[in-house]
Image (cartoon, helix red, strand yellow):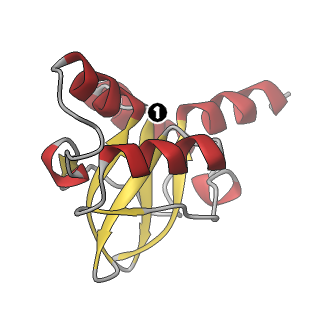
Amino acid sequence: MRIDQLFRREVVAVSADESLAEAASRMTFNEVSALPVLEGGELVGILTERDVVQAVADERDPTTTAVAECMTPRPVTIAPDAEVSDAARAMLEIGARHLPVLDGGRLVGMLSARDLLEADAEWP
């Protein structure tokens, strides 16, 4: 099975200069646990719930700390025509639960470990 059958095409993103508080609010409102970070329409990073929690644990002020200070730059990405097994392998190798999906260098969606689990539950 290819991931183009699974990934979420509704992209909720954040910019690198927004605060962690703004990003966390966006995550909560949209019920997502990772946000691609875009600058000028280009993917420059990914911010996850883990990043936000780590920043708070490090006693960083979420209202004044920029996303750029806590995001993972140049995240591992995957193409929409990749196989589910390739996505799962990539997530396991890097210890991630989310992969931005790029088609021709353009962000077209996000794939989560939950997407993979739901697909697995539906397989015969």
Going by the picture, which residue comes out furthest to the top?
A: 57
Residue at coordinates 38% horizontally, 80% vertically from top-left?
104
How many numbered circles does the render carry?
A: 1
- Amino acid type at image mark 1: Ala
Q: Identify the residue shown where x is 55% and y is 64%.
A: 11
- Camera-nearest residue between 24 and 89: 24
**Residue 123 visible (yes or no):** yes
Reading the image, the residue beneath label 1 is 88
Residue 89 relative to residue 61: left or right: right
Pick whichever, 61 or 50, lies toward us.
61
Placement of the C terminus among the 4 image quadrants:
top right
Q: In this rendering, is residue 62 above or below 106?
A: above
Going 64% across and 64% down the picture, which residue do you hit? 10
Kindly identify the residue that appears in the image at 73 percent across and 36 percent down.
119
User: Image quarter for residue 57?
Assistant: top left
Residue at disc 1, secondary structure: helix
Q: Where is residue 54 in the image (x, y as percent from the top left)?
A: 25, 23
| x, y percent for residue 109 | 54, 62
Horizontal side of 112 relative to 119 (left or right) equals left
How would you rate the neighbour count of disc 1 (Cα within 10 Å): few for under 14, some for 14-19, many for 20 or more?
A: some
Q: Is residue 123 above or below residue 58?
A: below
Q: Can you see residue 86? A: no
In this rendered view, identify the residue nearer to me: 43 or 30: 30
Residue 50 point in image, percent of width and height: 35, 26
Position of residue 108 measured from the top left corner of the image (x, y, whole percent):
51, 71
Residue 18 is left or right of residue 106, and the answer is left
In the figure, residue 121 lies in which quadrant?
top right
In the image: residue 73, left or right of residue 80? left
